[in-house]
Amino acid sequence: MKRLLNDGYDAVEELLEGYVRAHSDVVQLADNERVVVRRSLSETPKVGIVFGGGSGHEPLFLGYVGEGLADAAVIGNVNTSPDPMACYDAVTTVDQGRGCLYIYGNYQGDVLNFDMGAELAAEDGIRVETVLVTDDVYSASDRAERRGVAGDVFVLMAACAVANTGADLDAVKAAAEKANANTYSMGVALSSSTLPVTGKPIFEIGEDDMEVGMGIHGEPGIERKKLEPADAVVDEILGIVLPDMDLKAGEEVALMINGLGGLPLMDQYICYRHAHDMLCAKGVTIAKSMVGNYATSMDMIGMGLTLVRLDDELKGWLNAPFNAPYLKQ
Amino acid sequence: MKRLLNDGYDAVEELLEGYVRAHSDVVQLADNERVVVRRSLSETPKVGIVFGGGSGHEPLFLGYVGEGLADAAVIGNVNTSPDPMACYDAVTTVDQGRGCLYIYGNYQGDVLNFDMGAELAAEDGIRVETVLVTDDVYSASDRAERRGVAGDVFVLMAACAVANTGADLDAVKAAAEKANANTYSMGVALSSSTLPVTGKPIFEIGEDDMEVGMGIHGEPGIERKKLEPADAVVDEILGIVLPDMDLKAGEEVALMINGLGGLPLMDQYICYRHAHDMLCAKGVTIAKSMVGNYATSMDMIGMGLTLVRLDDELKGWLNAPFNAPYLKQ
């Protein structure tokens, strides 16, 4: 697959420079140029929300920095954790005296580096708590060991909705944990992403093949098999996700179809249609729908399905007003 | 390239069904199922805005139906004009007694079919005017003969901003014409889109090649050449667009980098960065920026650059509030 880049080693810096120029009314780079931060923080001091991870998943994470949403995003190299100093600098930049919450997907490198950032902040007397997003159903049977994928966005929304009410750090963390505990995702990849530095794919996959359960960095999935029609792929994902979450008739959910970057919106809505109809047939109410490229793997052709089990509280949080370049509601 | 579809012949119907289920709070299908219409029209009768064209360019056109933006989108098959009855039915569905404006890209099939729709509406006593979008600089030297590409979005915004003030059809049409006359686009394709029915690309292109000036349906461009770095591609486009629009230091523009579907946001922002810097170096002020997949060619890897020469009036129109699924501001 082809990319439109300059020197691949400069891709992340150039991305960030382009991003803050394009959205200069909303965001800017902090003194640490791997930290994208809101141009003006909340007028009323609130818990700071720091989102982040490797780059190559745009609009995740930087696209969700904005009014009412994340206060900062910490950006690593492609598929690589942000460095500890960036994690720390984000906190010192956005802390308003009420502490900060780190929200990021559960990957070993991220955990190490964000934890070091939190320790450095603690030395400054700033309390930082962490909620790891663990929504990728196939990545582990134990929820705590699962990876984070597009569920990041729902966890962020819940935390920010509560932080915006002026709640304290414990309450904001509890909201994020509640959202995460109710979020379930699984994806399928039809192609690899293309790495900027090498110009090469991460893995090879046959012309007629797909990999079910693949992670957004190309982590191996359940099985590689012949590409199936969209409805069959959705059925396969629901066949794993629904039993895992033990979803029952009468329950309410948020449903996201997340494009991994190279999949047309046409295909994404065709997948949405079938997921919608299967859930309705099961007696499940879809109270919120999101379709689009929310958490990508650059040019990877593929799709992830995310379900969030809702109650009135969670539904309220996910429908709160947000105004970031890639999430306005 | 791979797609995630069912029977390719059903792709457009399934796209539309999925779309209106996902966005049922905003849109619905009209009795004619190729017409996506706002769930509730303006409470104060206003000029109806009907947008449309072939499918395969999502989120164009259906993604721009919503509060304050298009009242209806008329949808054809992939890369194919909508049929005349759909064009007519859209008018009868959204007309509030103040007439309607058709806005669509300048393609022969669209002109024929929308014109027939307007004639049928005239027989019902509904006045319909038309503004053809003609922003694709390379497609013809004469503005009136140019094709319409991503500039569709700017022309729509201008027309809707004025329609929302309660202005009459002549004023709304004049606003759309003014926006169109000031809008200039050019694109580059690195790959073909993949047609749903055949599963095949429209054209072949070498592994290291790009085509400069290509249209969003795969219309031939200026030349096919070796793929260049992003900055060089942007320079090449600006080298054609800027002289064509005779842009001078001290002027203000809106700048859009439009992804054609398969190009990562990372690459789009890298292109934006260089375009931004080149325009600033020339003394041009970028008063509005838009980066993302606004008008695609399904999975085509490629990018288009659009510039709109602004005055205070046009700037006001483009910054009006809109609330459609793919354009909220």
Image (spheres, coloured by chain):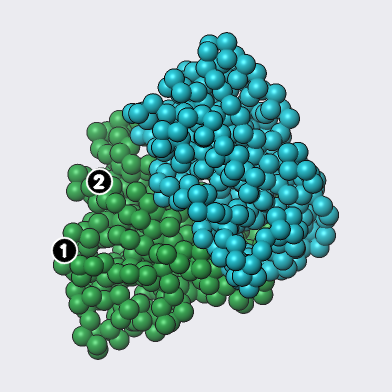
Chain colours: A green, B cyan
Residue A315, numbered circle: 2
Q: Please tell me which residue lies in front, A201 or A61.
A: A61
Label 1, on which residue?
A167
Where disc 2 sits, the SS reads helix
Q: Is residue A237 left or right of residue A71?
A: right
Residue A248: quadrant of the picture: top left
The residue type indicated by label 1 comes to Ala
Give the Cα separation between the discs numbered 1 and 2: 18 Å
- Point out residue B167 in the picture as x, y percentages from the top left corner: 45, 33
Q: Reading the chain from its start, which is encountered first: label 1 or label 2?
A: 1
Q: Position of residue B165 (x, y in %)?
A: 41, 37
* Secondary-structure class at tag 1: loop
Q: Chain of mark 2?
A: A
Tell me if residue B321 can be seen.
Answer: yes
Q: Residue furthest top?
A: B123
Q: Is residue B324 left or right of residue A102?
A: right
Give the amino acid type for the residue marked by disc 2 in the picture.
Lys
Where is A237 relative to B272, above or below? above
Looking at the rendered image, the disc whose residue lies closer to the viewer, 1 or 2, is: 1
In this picture, is A268 found above or below A112?
Answer: above
